[in-house]
Amino acid sequence: MEKIVITGGAGFIGSHLCEALLNRGYQVLCVDNLITGSEKNLESFKGNSNFEFKNLDVTRDQIDCSGASYIFHLASPASPVDYQKHPEETALANSLGTINLLKEAVKAKARFLMASTSEVYGDPKEHPQKETYWGNVNSYGPRSCYDEGKRFAETMVYIYRQKYDLDTRIVRIFNTYGPRMQKDDGRVVSNFINQALEQKPLTIYGEGKQTRSFCFVSDLVEGLMKLMFTEGLKGEVVNLGNPEEYTMLSLAEKIKAITGSSSEIVFKDIPADDPKQRCPDISKAKTLLGWEPRIKVDEGLVKTIEYFRSA
Ligand code: NAD
Ligand code: UDP
């Protein structure tokens, strides 16, 4: 049975990935320091004899990956509220943490997948964003710990790919949502749903004309596994996300309609460096992986709303 290490495995995406890999019969070692994740996310599968959880910090502890064939490196705070609360930890998880895991991958001769982000494109001047776009990113601002942390991590992956001929893959994940998001992570989907369910005002930052594209977590996890397990993709960088694009105003209205909420919509200041538009070009994922999202936003929102209703 093949062994897989997942850093950040107790987080939102990581826990779904652990579960999907266990369901496929892999042995999973989940490493997480629980800075933004939770052992609660592991509840439904922690009794599986193929699963092991270790509370370790990728920036400080040695993560023993011996015997592992694959390493998914997801450890990093990810929501703007979380990474701005923990800027140093975020920059370090992506810099030092990535270097530490790359060294482990070389030792174990494991295939290495790094979770990057659409944030490497910053406030993009090209739309939709293709993998070839270099981005428009502020190196000195509130989002830099994350954006530049991920850009540095990509560079380290490139170096290890060249220097050690490591089998690496980089996924640039676009906004993903679904069950096990934290209620207070400050992301737009969790905020709007919880505000709507509690009949509180839905808080739009700015005029609500900025756009995002939302991928349901099961689709994303399917894409992560395809990128890792498809042969012949050494060194590839691939966008994964749902290209259906919404303004934040239309998302607020959609969530109000699905929840049947009578909440009002209020407008607050837009945060610094908030990207105005974001939408993935997923033609590369379609061609290389035969992947595209299957869950429509309305369907995914219903599942996420059910989760928060019962959480
Ligand atoms: P999350 O915060 O729920 O999960 C991240 C996990 O990493 C948490 O469990 C956290 O405790 C852990 N972690 C952080 N620093 C660590 C450290 N030093 N050592 C060990 N564990 C550490 O976030 P998520 O949404 O599940 O994101 C997972 C990955 O996907 C991240 O790398 C993120 O940057 C990337 N990503 C997510 C999205 C999204 O929309 N959710 C978009 C783009 C990229
Ligand atoms: N946003 C909003 N209201 C909220 C939370 C977020 O209008 O309560 C906006 C935010 O300014 C951004 C978009 O929604 O333009 C997506 O924010 P999120 O934090 O989910 O992710 P980002 O794509 O910015 O990393």
Image: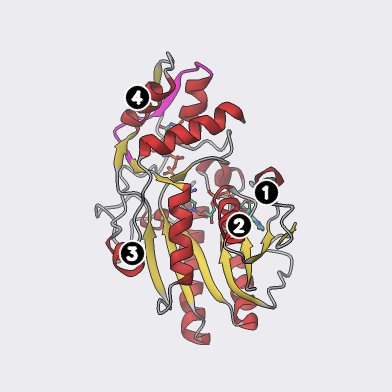
Q: Which label lies toward us, 2 or 4?
A: 2
- Give the class, few, some or many, for how many residues have Cα within 10 Å of label 3's Cα (few <14, many ≥20): few
Of the image marks 1 and 4, the number of the one nearer the N terminus: 1
- Circles 2 and 3, Cβ within 8 Å, touching? The answer is no
Residue 42, which numbered label? Answer: 1
- Circles 1 and 2, Cβ within 8 Å, touching? The answer is yes
Residue drawn at (49%, 73%) of the image? 157
* Residue type, numbered disc 1: Leu
Q: Main secondary structure of the magenta part?
A: loop
- Circles 2 and 4, Cβ within 8 Å, touching? The answer is no
According to the image, label 2 marks what residue?
18
Q: Which residues are magenta?
A: 198-211
Q: Position of residue 254 (x, y in %)?
A: 35, 27
**SS class, disc 1:** helix
**SS class, disc 2:** helix
Ligand 2 resides in the quarter of the picture at: top left
Q: Is residue 90 magenta?
A: no
Q: Position of residue 233 (x, y in %)?
A: 40, 76
Say whether mark 1 is within 8 Å of ligand 1. Answer: no
Which quadrant holds the C terminus?
A: top right
**How many circles with numbers are drawn on the protein?**
4
* Residue type, numbered disc 2: Cys
According to the image, label 3 marks what residue?
290
Give the left or right position of residue 247, taking residue 146 as reference: left
